[in-house]
Image: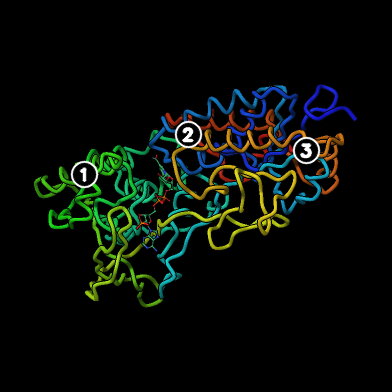
Amino acid sequence: MSSLGTQKNPLRAAIVGSGPAGFYAAEALIGSAPAVLVDMFERLASPFGLVRSGVAPDHPKLKQPIKVYQQIAESPQFRFLGNVTVGHDVSVKELKDCYHVVIFACGTQTDRTMGIPGESLPGSHAATEFVGWYNGHPDYRDLVFDLSHETAVVIGQGNVAVDVCRILAKTADELRHTDIAAHALEVLAQSRIRDIHMIGRRGPAQAKFTHPEIRELGELAECDPVVDPRDLELNSASREELADKRNRANIKSYEVLQAFAARPPSTRHRRCHIEFLKSPIELSGEGRLERVVLMRNRLEGEPSRQVARETGEIEELACGVLFRSIGYRGVAILGVPFDEARGVIPNRDGRVIDDGDVVAGLYVTGWIKRGPTGIIGTNREDSVLTVNSILADLPHLDVGARPGMDRLRALLEGRGSRVVSYADWQKIDAAEIRRGQPAAKPREKFTRLKEMLDVLGS
Ligand code: NAP
């Protein structure tokens, strides 16, 4: 048998997941010296993961990496198999039989929970659901968000929380010409929300949002940001944190918050209150969410390691809808080791490990490797590191030829799966763009699998 990575015996790689981490892994593999064939598996009929269904519709620049992914997808070494769920339509064992290496780039598909009483009351939602809903993700298409109350609460102060606040705060006119899903625009246009409270458990020096994102809350047509100047008073450890130039990003966010606190009282229709040092301890109401009980916190610990500690001081906030935006979590795949505590696939330099031992041929990249952190570009570096591990392992991998997609496709079609190829996706993509034109939108997304398959005439 000729060695692996030659024209006679190309390295056959399966990538599970078609978000940024998956595409950057494909790019690194295709650009590497050995002969490589890459097949990318995706649960949905559409590629691009969170760039399509996570990035906010009013942030089109952040979707520009899609152009790079399109170029990668057009490589003759690349194939796309959409509408295939690994672990359900095809097992990890079957993938291993067809490919030399399998790379999991499936992201963190669910959210963390707060673990407090009343969390599952109607009106209490995960931010991930709301984001998926307004972005037209088929899994969230039929969710109902009741925006008929005047007060909304968002728990957490990362960029997802800011996205949720901004989408709630914007007018329909500000969203109308984005790629927001039509069903979401219709509901948001009727929203009666006037006060949005974004609540962080720690202080303004520790907020996770970045300054361009928080600054945008001060640039909206009908919403003012509201910051209580007393909330910006810092303890000595926080002052030390902000004096450290390595925390430049936090310093800039803090300056934005100072500017918000100095604004004259709000005269606009909506207000976004940015509040610190409070943790939700209970959600309550008669049959649905009516209020959140908050515990005031103080910070304790060394600079950059400060944690929120309860003060015993409690306050209540009446609200009709609440979104927890406290981070994402990975979901275990049948046949792949999983770290339940961290919600990721355990790995060493991208090599999947089980009880400390490397599982030959299995790799991981992106959020399911390192947890849900960083910007889109962070996944490029991460995927290059994983691909470097694969290339270093090449001499030790099983050199036996693998059938790759040909056997897999037959297997899937024998099971009645309708595999969506990249050419199929291009037809769906073109149809979405056409659908958006009458409303001057970049596209009107299909939000159901059936609608997408109907475009393909199957
Ligand atoms: P994140 O940045 O990790 O923020 C999570 C927030 O939840 C933090 O404020 C955290 O507070 C808080 N939190 C965690 N557990 C909590 C609890 N039990 N109770 C109360 N608060 C809790 O996560 P994310 O907002 O989901 O964003 C994920 C990643 O995507 C980030 O890297 C983000 O920058 C990126 N992203 C970027 C953009 C953009 O560039 N425009 C948009 C969206 C997302 P502590 O700090 O106290 O833990």
Q: Residue furthest right?
A: 1
| Residue drawn at (75%, 46%) of the image | 360
- Label 3 to label 2, Cα distance in Å? 30 Å
Type of amino acid at the residue the image marks with label 1: Ala
Determine whether the residue tagged by mark 1 lies in a helix, strand or loop: helix
N-term mark: 1 or 2:
1
Determine whether the residue tagged by mark 2 lies in a helix, strand or loop: loop
Residue 456 x, y percent position in the rendering: 70, 34
| Residue drawn at (43%, 61%) of the image | 125
Judge: label 2 CB < 8 Å from ligand 1.
Answer: no
N-term mark: 3 or 1:
1
- Label 1 to label 2, Cα distance in Å? 27 Å
Which residue is under mark 1? 243
Q: Nearer the viewer, residue 54 or 150?
A: 54
How many neighbours does mark 1 have within 10 angstroms: few (below 14), some (14-19), or many (20 or more)?
A: few
Q: Residue furthest left?
A: 264
Which residue is under mark 3? 396
So how many labels did they put on this image?
3
Q: Is residue 200 visible?
A: yes
Which residue is under mark 2? 377
Q: Is 442 left, or right, of 223 in this rendering?
A: right
Residue 122, located in which quarter of the rendered image?
bottom left
